[in-house]
Each structure stands twice: as structure tokens, then as C-alpha cells.
Amino acid sequence: MKKIVFALGLAIMSVSAAGAADLPRNSAPYYSAAPATGFNWSGGYVGANIGYNWGKITNTGTNPSGLEGGLQGGYNWQNGQFVFGAETDLQLSGADDTFAPFKFSNPWFGTLRGRGGFAYCNFLFYLTGGLAYGGLKAENGLLTESKTHIGWTAGLGAEVGITSNWSAKAEYLYMDLGSRSYSLTGTTNGYQANMIRLGLNYHF
């Protein structure tokens, strides 16, 4: 599944790069009179994404993995070729795993991150990091226990302008949802995960 998502990301980038040559030179919000960048990333945006995450639950043998998908929104400021901004997202996740006698799942999570990067033509390459939060559910037979965890996330990505208002991105994030005590397991458990995802954004 990870190979499929990665291949789709490469395909989107290839198609986007080819289509970028056909963009009208006065297309907003990307076009800028500044010859160094050629596009203007400033402004707000909303979008959706789909991806895959895989990781482990600390102090157990469970390694949840599965598809994820959700919505994101943010705002960028541009100074020359440097772009800074903030983004938030909320995801539904199918990541789960069973290692007798326990099953752990991560049904949802979200992030609130800063972004900083470098723009070249219609491409934006960036680093990102900030707050992560999400739910963990432990099961043992008919017994269940759910908690909300708070932690951190960091990663990198690339975004490309496709048309005057649309962009596509490919992103990698590492997420660490801090540990909490679970009565069901008799110890502390947290979720450490990697994720790759593809997204589309509409820029205002």
C-alpha cells in the first residue's frame, strides 16, 4: 500500500509539472511579477488528503497500520522565494493491529503545524512541525478503553500549482502521540507512527 501511495504521488507531480507550462501568466494566486519565483503562494487555502500510516503502540507488540484521510486548511505568507505559514488538519484513520490478547486502534487524529519552505516556479518545498493529538482505543475481549493523546509531529513535503486556484501535494509526517496509563494493559501506552499522504488544495 505504501508503494501505491508513493507511486501516485510521483504521478501527480509529473502530471502537474507538465501542466504547469500551460498556466496563464496572470493566473492568481500563484502568479507574481517577481521573476525569482514566478508564482505567489500567499493567502488561505482548504483541501483534502488521503494516505497511509504505520507505527507501533509502546509497551505492547501491536503495530497498527491502515489508510487515513481527512481535511486540511491553512494560510501562507511569502517573502521573495521564502514561504511561511500555518496548517491544521483532522483525519479519520483505519490503523489497527492485534497482538494477543490486545487490539489497539487509532481511529482519528489531527495536527496544528507551522510550515516553512522555498518556492521555485510553481513548486513549493517545505518543512513542517507542531502539535499532534488523537485517539487510541484498546480492546481485550469484550473490554474496551479509549483515551485522547497529545504529542508532536514533524515532516516535509512538496506542493505544486496545477491551475490558477488548485495545487497538489505529497507529504511525509512522523507523529508521536504521548503515552498515557491504560487500566486494560496495566501500563502506559502511546502511538508512534509514520505517514505518507497525497492532497489537493483550493487557494482563495
Image: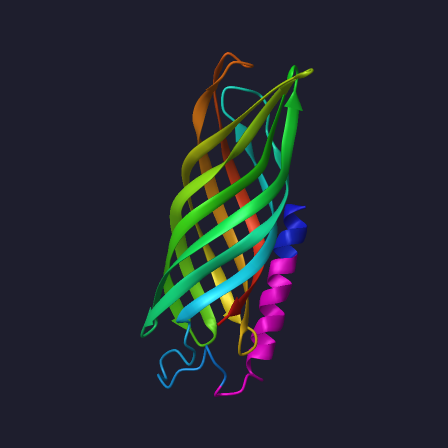
- Left or right, residue 35 beside residue 123: left
Magenta stretch holds residue 10: yes
Q: Is residue 114 above or below residue 84?
A: above
**Above or below for 75 versus 81:** above
Relative to 123, residue 109 above or below: above
Measured from the top left, where is residue 199 in percent x and y?
Answer: 57, 59
* Relative horizontal placement of residue 5, taking residue 110 as reference (left or right): right
Is 26 located above or below residue 104 in the figure?
below
Q: How is the image coloured?
A: rainbow
Numbered label tally: 0
Location of residue 77 in the rendering, given as x and y in whole percent from the top left corner:
35, 68
Residue sitting at x 56%, y 46%:
91
Q: Nearer the viewer, residue 117 or 183?
A: 183
* Residue sitting at the far left: 79
Percent position (x, y) of residue 8? 65, 59
Assess whether residue 197 is covered by the magenta stretch: no
Residue depicted at 50% across the width and 51% down the height: 89
Return the x and y of residue 161 as percentages of the image width and height.
52, 72
- Point 41% across, 36% down: residue: 151
The quadrant where residue 100 appears: top right
Q: Residue furthest top?
A: 186
Report the residue at 68% width, 46% height from top: 1
**39 relative to 102 in the view: left or right:** left
Q: Main secondary structure of the magenta part?
A: helix
Please provide the residue range marked out in magenta. 8-26
Question: Is 124 positioned to the left or the right of 49 in the image?
Answer: left
